Image (cartoon, grey):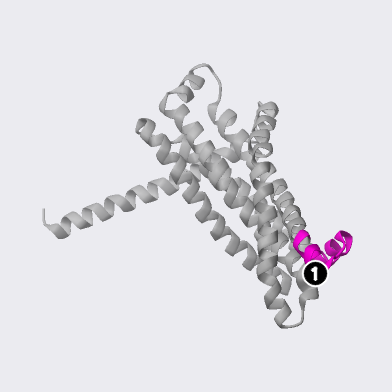
Amino acid sequence: MSILSAKKYVFSKETDQYLVGINQAFRFVVRFFKEVFSRPFHFREVINQCFEVGLKSLPLITVTGFIIGIVFTKQSRPSLESFGASSWLPSLMGVALVKALGPLVTALICAGKVGSSIGAELGSMKVTEQIDAMEVSAINPFKYLVVTRVLATTITIPLLALYCSFVALYGSYVNVHAEEATGIIIFYKNAFSSISFIDIFTSLSKTIVFGFTIGVVGCYKGYNAIQGTRGVGKAANQAVVLAMFLVFLEEIVIVQVANWIRYF
């Protein structure tokens, strides 16, 4: 076999594997939508996963959001002061944090923390044949393990994003109050004065899509892990990388669609 033929063979094999992976991911998502509306409904497990995703992420979200609010305000102040528009700082912070930074930062944090956790957890269950044991014992592992976790991330991450935005705004208020002694009520009133319903709807839509994506990617990589313990680490790493990439891609698409809607 010549070098050119070998390269064509390798390229063809990689292309086939890529297309097969897309087909498997599509079937995985379709199966989720089929299973989510069928009985039994594991409400207790959904609540337990919401606790794992939500409450255990609150400390990290709180610290990160507060620091982002302070730092972004400090960096924005000199630019506004150079134009004599420092009074617009609360409005700028409201638009930036609620529309963009709050949802995006929350999604990236959860992609790293929650996505890797789900991928590693399901991956270890897969390679140790615990998922196969659940199938033998007449339990639907997909519904119990995958559906509950995807629902938990879809429900919880929008709430975390909203919380992150308010904490970041409070961090911004702390900085503004230290410089100008502005009251908290006036600060929040000015911060939300430039935010419309379409902005809030767009932010909520983004976080729902982000949460669903993080849950699906983490579950898919973990549920299909191979190669033993090495595959568990690989599944967790791929879950984080792919989830972050899709979050950025969805951010671009949703913002563009929202701009089209706003113009019409």
Whether residue 255 is visible, yes or no, is: yes
Residue 182 falls within the magenta-colored stretch: yes
Front-most of 79 and 17?
A: 79
Q: Is residue 169 above or below residue 256?
A: above
Q: Which residue is pictured at 87% across the width and 62% down the height?
A: 183
**Left or right: residue 145 compared with residue 41:** left
Q: Which residues are magenta?
A: 174-195
Residue at 60% of width from left, 60% of height from top?
251
Residue 182: where, in percent of width, then height? 85, 65
Residue 221 lies, in percent from the top left, at 46, 40
The quarter of the picture where residue 40 lies is top right
Q: Is residue 264 visible?
A: no
Query: Is residue 176 in the magenta section?
Result: yes
**Residue 31 is drawn in which quadrant?**
top right
Q: Element type at marker 1?
A: loop
Residue 55, percent across and down?
69, 37
**What residue would you read off at disc 1?**
194
**Residue sitting farthest toward the front:** 178
Amino acid carrying mark 1 in the image: Ser
Residue 37 falls left or right of residue 9: right
- Is 88 left or right of 28, judged from the image as shown? right
Compared with 90, 233 (above or below) is: above
Q: Position of residue 139 (x, y in %)?
A: 56, 21
Front-most of 81 and 153? 81
Q: Residue at x 38, y 36 (%)?
A: 231
Quadrant housing residue 66: bottom right
